[in-house]
Image (cartoon, grey):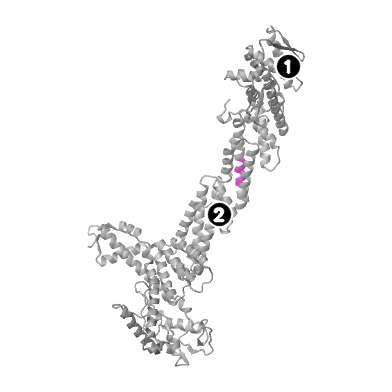
Amino acid sequence: MHHTENDKKRANFSALSPINGAIIKTTATGKPGDVKKIIIKNMKYVELLRKSLLYFWSGSQCRSAYPSIPENFEETTWNQLRKAVIAIQTSTPIEYSLECLCQAVSHMCEDKMDSQLYVNLTALVEQHVKANIVPFLSESGDKLVYLKKMNDYWQSHCQQMIMIRSIFLYLDRIYVLNNPTVHSIWEMGLELFRDHIAMNNLVQARTVEGILILIEKERHGDTVDRSLLKSLLRMLSDLQIYRDAFEQKFLMATKHLYQAEGQAKMEELDVPDYLQHVDKRLNEEEERLEHYLDGCTRHQLIVTVERQLINEHVTGILQKGLDQLLEENRLSDLTRLYKLFSRVKNGTTELCAHFNAYIKKKGRTIVIDPEKDKSMVQDLLDYKDKMDNIVNTCFERNEKFGNSLREAFEYFINQRSNKPAELIAKYVDMKLRAGNKEATEEELEQILDKIMVQFRFIHGKDVFEAFYKKDLAKRLLVGKSASVDAEKSMLSKLKQECGGGFTSKLEGMFKDMELSRDINFAFKQSMQNSEHKELQNIDLTVNILTMGFWPTYPVMEVTLPQELLQYQSIFNKFYLAKHSGRKLQWQPTLGHCALVLLLFNYNAAITFEEIRAAVNIENGELKRTLQSLACGKARVLTKIPKGREVENTDKFQFNNEFTNKLFRIKINQIQMKETTEEQKATEERVYQDRQYQIDAAIVRIMKMRKTLSHNLLITELYKQLTFPVKPADLKKRIESLIDRDYMERDKDNQNQYNYVA
């Protein structure tokens, strides 16, 4: 018989009555099979005056005699003890008191009859156990009846052994303790039951088969007697045959059941329902462990269920239902999916991979379609919020999923070069413009933080910088910035993310605006003390812009009224007197002086062509200006014919009915809109800047390395350049530098370049 270490536990006695001064304490429930700790204090009763007293009995009376052992003492005493044991086994009254029986046992032990007494008792118990196997060998009909009969006999046997041990306690405590190879009376009873009942092939097979049938019925929804199952499984455990006789068969039955069920349910149910079913099954098995299965089965049982219902279907579950759960934001189902997949090897790894693939696939549809450009950035922000919430709520903020989410966003947002960067810059412009009443300062700050997350994903940050710079210039010059604090907060975020080199020109723009305010204040003070009183009614504000900080604007000559030309001249003298050596280049198209309106001081109605000839403003700029004056909210001019677009054939006249409660009116809404030409010009500037950066990087690398192969040079360039670039573009720049004698091809190896000092 083979027993494992884990099986080495013994059930012990339940409640024992105090015997002749012995104090007996138990620490368990008193049910058969429970492990109990018995502490016996005061064994003085074994010191009874054997030297002066001997007890023998006749009928039911104990009598004293002279202190000499009768010739037939052992035989007589054993017969009385044997009768007591048989009475216990047959549930009939015992003729003698427990005190007399216990003292008889102690006398026999003291007289060195303990070994034979143990042998006799063992034989008597064995004879009884052997005789009781017969009912369990006959044809078994009802499995439940058979199990109840087995349980009744087991309970009866345990109670009998408890009572027998109470009589033979002295033998159990003295003789057994002094002979390590001898089993305790309780263990002897267990061993005899195991050898002659439980280890009988037929009995064991019927018992285990019955237990498995009951468990299967319960798994299919029937109500079964759990106390019966608990008692029988405790019996197998106490007999140390739980694992060999039951556990492996049980685990095999479990595997077959859930193997078939997993395949059937995967076809029958959708993923949310299947996950609920798996959750329910695992909870049911935990209940079985709690109510009747041995704790040693827990690991293998749960692993078996997980393997058949989860492991085997990981890919199927993900392919069948993950996209739908993510699409529909099914948070509770996703939480359940994550918890179940966390229980199995590689479960979360597979989930993370499919999660990553979904984000890339879905994200690409947001970025790649030009028709969705208007809503792209908001869609990206909403999509990121949704995915972040799933990672935080459903995937327990698992770092692996967070990293995968960021990698997926970076991948798909760069599937379309330049456009996402441009649109993110324009989105920031929209949020920072005056007139944006959608958010409080706190909400705006949160939006900017989210925008910065999207900004980090972009490879071509120079595109963002170019459009952001252009839009910032327009906000500052036209006075349409919502908040200086918000502007500087965004600038601070960009500086923290990209360094001071990225934001130095942007910071210079703010500095120019602050210096311009001081200059204008000083200029107006000087005008108050000048002789040009006739010009003081004209409100002239000049912004002094450092050429290197601001976007490059085309120089455009316009025809100014005499009054403004005079004002210009006075300002030139004022400024250059304070800053000698500097040169002022006027950019009237960046301003919003009303050159067109001044024409109506002398003409009631003027055609588009006449206006263009008079002011000399570029055609597109003039149309936007006239559209602002005649087609916006404040319609100072009336367009003939009416319409939203300005045509070359249109005619304009002053709107005499125009009124406004404000004295100063800013008419520049349409000027804020970006034209196609502006967009193309910005893209061209980015392209040119990239050419310069590539050239500089090539020269820098070659100057340091002197000689380098084509492939190594390309590799070095990819490491240094911060924007996406194709190998063909790099090859063009290399050829350009060779033509300009910055480098040359090696004469012996055309694939090698040499630096030309």
- Asked if the residue at tag 2 contacts the one at tag 1, i.e. Cβ–Cβ closer than 8 Å, the answer is no
- The residue lying at 55 percent from left, 45 percent from top is 343
Q: Quadrant of the N terminus?
A: top right
Question: Based on the displayed image, in which of its 4 quarters is residue 708 positioned?
Answer: bottom left
Q: Residue at x 65, y 33 (%)?
A: 233
Please name whichever residue, 255 or 286, is drawn nearer the observer in this view of the structure: 286
Looking at the image, tell me whether mark 1 or mark 2 is earlier in sequence order. Answer: 1
For residue 438, which quarter of the picture? Answer: bottom right
Task: Mark 2: give few (<14), some (14-19) or many (20+) Cα within 10 Å.
Answer: some
Q: Residue at x 31, y 80 (%)?
A: 577
Q: Secondary structure at mark 2?
A: helix
In the image, taking residue 583 as reference, residue 663 lies left or right, namely right
- At mark 1, the secondary structure is helix
Q: Classify residue 709 as left or right of residue 412.
A: left
Main SS, magenta region, reads: helix
Q: Which mark is residue 83?
A: 1
Q: Amino acid at mark 1?
A: Lys
Magenta region: 256-264
| Foreground of the two, 440 or 190 | 440
Q: Badge 2 is on which residue?
A: 393
Q: Position of residue 162 (x, y in %)?
A: 68, 24
x and y percentages locating residue 559 in the rendered image? 38, 87
Residue 557 drawn above or below residue 56: below
Please give the count of numbered marks on the rendered protein. 2
Q: CA distance from mark 1 to mark 2?
A: 72 Å
Label 2 is placed on what type of residue?
A: Thr
- Residue 144 is a magenta residue: no
Q: Is residue 116 visible?
A: no
Q: Is residue 582 above or below residue 378?
A: below
* Residue 257 lies within the magenta run: yes
